[in-house]
Image (tube, rainbow, N blue to C red):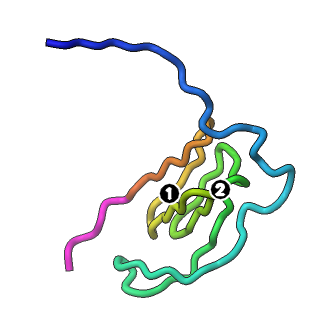
Amino acid sequence: NLRVAAEGGLARAYQESVRPESGEARSAHRPVYFAEAGQALTVPVYRRDALEPGVVIEGPCIVEEYASTTVVHPGDRLTVHDSGLLMIDIQPAGPAK
């Protein structure tokens, strides 16, 4: 048997120094196909570095950053946590068609 216990703190995932001093988080709009909608929807695109903690965005939308893209589907909700992490509340899918 092997047992391990660990304790420690987590560094903030989103550093204050990388935030822009000013500017709008929404940078564009883009058509995106969502199977659950059965069509392409024109959705807002947000700059990840401009989203402040506490921001809540209703899907659909896209969040872009240097190394990744986050897609928030229709009906889902994105919240920027105090640590800077993106949390997405995913709504249950409807009945299969």
Q: Secondary structure at mark 1?
A: strand
The answer to whether residue 5 is above or below residue 48 is above
Name the residue at 27% across, 69% down: 94
Name the residue at 35% across, 77% down: 36
Furthest toward the left, the residue is: 1
Q: Amino acid at mark 1?
A: Arg
The answer to whether residue 43 is above or below residue 18 is below
Please rate how many residues cluster around mark 1, counting C-alpha atoms within 10 Å: few if below 14, some from 14 to 19, many from 20. Answer: some
Q: Is residue 94 magenta-colored? A: yes
Q: Which span is picked out in magenta?
A: 91-97
Name the residue at 65% across, 78% down: 29
- The residue that disc 1 covers is 77
Q: Amino acid at mark 2?
A: Arg
In terms of sequence position, does the residue under pointer 2 or pointer 1 come before the other?
2
Q: Quadrant of residue 39?
A: bottom left
Q: Are marks 2 and 1 in contact (CB under 8 Å)?
A: no
Quadrant where the C terminus is found in the figure:
bottom left
Relative side of 94 to 87, left or right: left
Please rate how many residues cluster around mark 2, counting C-alpha atoms within 10 Å: few if below 14, some from 14 to 19, many from 20. Answer: many
Residue 31, position in %: x, y?
A: 55, 83
Relative side of 31 to 4, left or right: right
Residue 46, position in %: x, y?
A: 65, 64
Looking at the rendered image, the disc whose residue lies closer to the viewer, 2 or 1, is: 2
Q: Is residue 15 magenta-colored? A: no
Residue 95, position in %: x, y?
A: 22, 71
Furthest toward the bottom, the residue is: 39
Quadrant where the N terminus is found in the figure:
top left
- The residue that disc 2 covers is 48
**Label 2 to label 1, Cα distance in Å?**
15 Å
Furthest toward the right, the residue is: 21
Residue 83, position in %: x, y?
A: 61, 36
Q: Nearer the viewer, residue 50 or 91?
A: 50
